[in-house]
Amino acid sequence: MAVYVDAAIWKWAGHLWCHLLADDTDELHRFAAELGVKRSSYQGPPKTSAPHYDITGFERDRAVRLGAIECSREQIVAIFRRVRVPNGKVRR
């Protein structure tokens, strides 16, 4: 199984942010815990269809050092589509 991060390009609250995804949700949570990211930061169904964490650029650098695979925007979109939960997002 693998864990993936895209580039930290999203500006919010004075930081640059990116996405942390994994092939398996349990692996995603394990890696996030090892990274020191709080479980309350998790985003998944029913809020969003693709299980992931939004992490800062600083956390991204640590994630890469811990073995996360760096991905382009196109690659991370393909991973989002692969790991998403069908009908997992509640539409309002």
Image (tube, grey):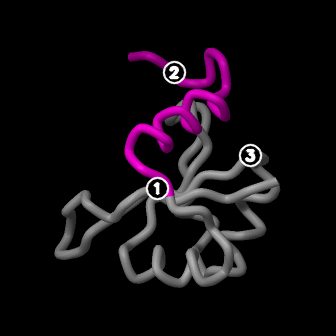
Alpha-carbon span between mark 3 and mark 2: 22 Å
Is 76 or 40 nearer to us in this picture?
Answer: 76
Find disc 1 in the rendering and name its residue: 19
Q: Is residue 29 left or right of residue 91?
A: right
Is 46 or 80 nearer to us in this picture?
Answer: 80
N-terminal of the two: label 3 or label 2? Answer: 3
Q: Residue at image x 49%, y 41%?
A: 75
N-terminal of the two: label 1 or label 2? Answer: 1
Residue 24 percent across, percent down from the top left: 78, 47
Residue 21 percent across, percent down from the top left: 60, 52
Residue 26 percent across, percent down from the top left: 81, 55
Find disc 3 in the rendering and name its residue: 23
Secondary element under disc 2, as helix, strand or loop, is loop
> Which is more foreground, mark 3 or mark 2?
3
Badge 1 vs badge 2, beta-carbon distance below 8 Å:
no
Q: Is residue 48 left or right of residue 84?
A: left
Position of residue 23 relative to residue 31, above or below, is: above
Is 42 or 32 nearer to us in this picture?
Answer: 32
Marker disc for residue 82: none
Kind of residue at badge 2: Val
Position of residue 43 relative to residue 37, above or below, is: above
Q: Please tell me in which quadrant of the rendered image residue 38 appears.
A: bottom right
Kind of residue at badge 1: His
Position of residue 51 relative to residue 89, above or below, is: below
**Which contiguous range is marked in magenta?**
71-92
Is 70 or 27 nearer to us in this picture?
Answer: 70
Quadrant of the snapshot with the N terminus:
bottom right
> Which is more foreground, mark 1 or mark 2?
1
Q: Is residue 20 left or right of residue 58?
A: right
Find disc 2 in the rendering and name its residue: 90
Badge 3 vs badge 2, beta-carbon distance below 8 Å:
no
